[in-house]
Image (cartoon, grey):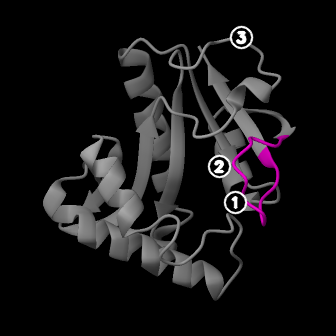
Amino acid sequence: MQIRKCQEAEIVPVGAFYDDVVLWLDNHINYPKWMYKIYPSENWAREMTEAGEQYICVDGKKIVGAFVLNADPQGNYRKGNWSQDLPDGAYMVLHALAIDPELQGRGLGAEVVRFCTEKAKAEGYKALRLDIVPGNIPAKKLYEKTGFRYVEDVDLDRNIAHIPMFSLYELNW
């Protein structure tokens, strides 16, 4: 599997990949509470690709994973009781990590976390942080297995009615 930045020509396929994952979740258990064609979506992938922050995981020519890595918490992370008091911009944030449902449980998510950790360290960031929907058991297991520490559940002022609280996680070095 290769992990690389999404290119403009790949925005539509990445959007379709996210749509497929959300439909799969809707037909099973939608732990992250993602919404079809809303988040994550082609529009999200376009915005993040244009910002240089959308990444894809490819196996040959097939997209098998997608995520966003940037320094924008997209919410009020200052509310968190983090173990290190870092200002915004001193840490990277992992968003919208999706793995092809047929390939889940094979270590691809852990490979993405390693990639993000190495990139954040190489670029001089002090930590990698993220948030998940409370009760997102698969994400909780992945992040704790890869060294993340649970911080707490907080309202990040995102004004998402069906997700009032988020579980914060951090990986410091």
Q: Residues within 10 Å of mark 2 (few under 14, many from 20)?
A: some
Q: Residues within 10 Å of mark 3 (few under 14, many from 20)?
A: few
Q: Residues within 10 Å of mark 1 (few under 14, many from 20)?
A: few
Q: Number of numbered discs present? A: 3
Left or right: where 111 falls relative to 56: right
In the image, what residue type sits under mark 3?
Asp
Task: Report the front residue among 82 and 101.
Answer: 82
Q: Residue at label 2?
A: 142
Q: Which residues are magenta?
A: 154-166
Q: Residue at label 1?
A: 138
Left or right: where 54 falls relative to 136: left
Q: Residue at label 3?
A: 85
| Magenta-drawn stretch, dominant element (helix, strand or loop) | loop
In the image, what residue type sits under mark 2?
Leu
Q: Secondary structure at mark 3?
A: loop
Closer to us: mark 3 or mark 1? 3
The image position of residue 168, as x and y in percent, is 74, 38
Report how far apart the C-alphas of labels 3 and 2 lie in the structure: 24 Å
Q: Classify 132 as above or below 121.
A: below
Q: Is residue 156 magenta?
A: yes
Image quadrant of residue 160? bottom right
Q: Classify 37 as above or below 2.
A: below
Q: Earlier in the sequence, mark 3 or mark 1?
A: 3
For residue 167, say whether it is visible.
Answer: yes
Left or right: where 170 falls relative to 59: right
The image position of residue 108, as x and y in percent, is 46, 54
Report how far apart the C-alphas of labels 1 and 2 lie in the structure: 6 Å
